[in-house]
Image (tube, rainbow, N blue to C red):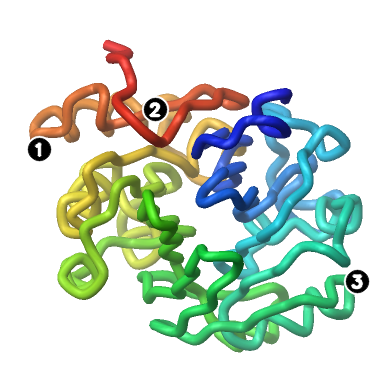
Amino acid sequence: LVAHEKGSDDFLTWLGHASFLIRIGGLTVLTDPYLTTFAGPAGLGPRRYVKSGVPISALPKIDLLVVSHNHYDHLDERALARLPGKDRMTVVVPLRLGRFFRERGFPNVIELDWHERHEIRGVSVTALPVVHWSRRSGFDTNRTLWAGFALRSDTHHLFFGGDSGYGPIFSEIGEAYGPFDTALLGIGAYEPRAMMKASHATPEEAVQMGRDLKAKRIVGMHWGTVLLTVEPPFEPPERFRKAADEQGYGPEDSWIMRIGETRPLSGAWPSNA
């Protein structure tokens, strides 16, 4: 973790699922920190089969915590309770999700509606619409907003997709906000299609999202960590790589990372093929 603490260059570390450590513009960012065992309340729900790439106790100081929506595999209350430095980090969440964090000891919480923007130390964070939904209990469906986020520094423009199905909104985002240097896109939890089409993209749709967003590099996430749906657990990266190749993304621009792996965001990444 020395690189996380001392390096000044932009990097990306995959912790598993939709959780990343990101260094961008001098800020250390943590996304959707599902870092404990169960994706559900009080020891219920699916159990992750790979530990977080970095234990909570070993995380670097977080400047910015970004959470896309309130599903249990993205908003992990047990991980939040153990997260150090609550009083010094800024938390950015979609509309009406701020109270959840303030009640749990995070004083610096910014709620954003779609297309709203907040700037922190030269890095702008913009909440963007994606094709998903929210629910924490049986009685709060879509009471809080869900979002993807654009993070922009002087040298890098990154899209974090949270959870999303495919739709024309990605072309609209690409036209209004693109191009992006890097897009982090969900490629798992897509079967059965009749049920999942409205909220989770297939690997092929994720690659198309990248094209629509005008992203130079696409990174597959939301797979290989916890079994949420019925597709074979290691099918997503194979389909993602094939679709990326067919849509003109070379191996250096279509990343399947190992959990715990860190890659620099600047410059070219050598081929994994």
Question: Could you tell me which secondary element the residue under label 1 belongs to?
Answer: loop
Q: Position of residue 74 (x, y in %)?
A: 63, 57
Q: Residues within 10 Å of mark 1 (few under 14, many from 20)?
A: some
Amino acid found under the numbered disc labelled 3: Gly
Measured in 3D between alpha carbons, the distance from the residue under mark 3 to the one under mark 2, in whole angstroms, is: 35 Å
| 252, 8: nearer the viewer | 8
Residue 256 tag number? 2
Contact between marks 1 and 3 (CB within 8 A): the answer is no
Q: Position of residue 63 (x, y in %)?
A: 70, 57
Residue 105 tag number? 3
Measured in 3D between alpha carbons, the distance from the residue under mark 1 to the one under mark 2, in whole angstroms, is: 16 Å
- Would you identify the image quadrant in which residue 70 lies? bottom right
Q: Is residue 271 above or below residue 63?
A: above
Residue at the spot of label 1: 247
Residue mark closest to the camera, 3 vs 2: 3
- Would you identify the image quadrant in which residue 245 lies? top left
Q: Earlier in the sequence, mark 1 or mark 2?
A: 1
Q: Earlier in the sequence, mark 1 or mark 3?
A: 3
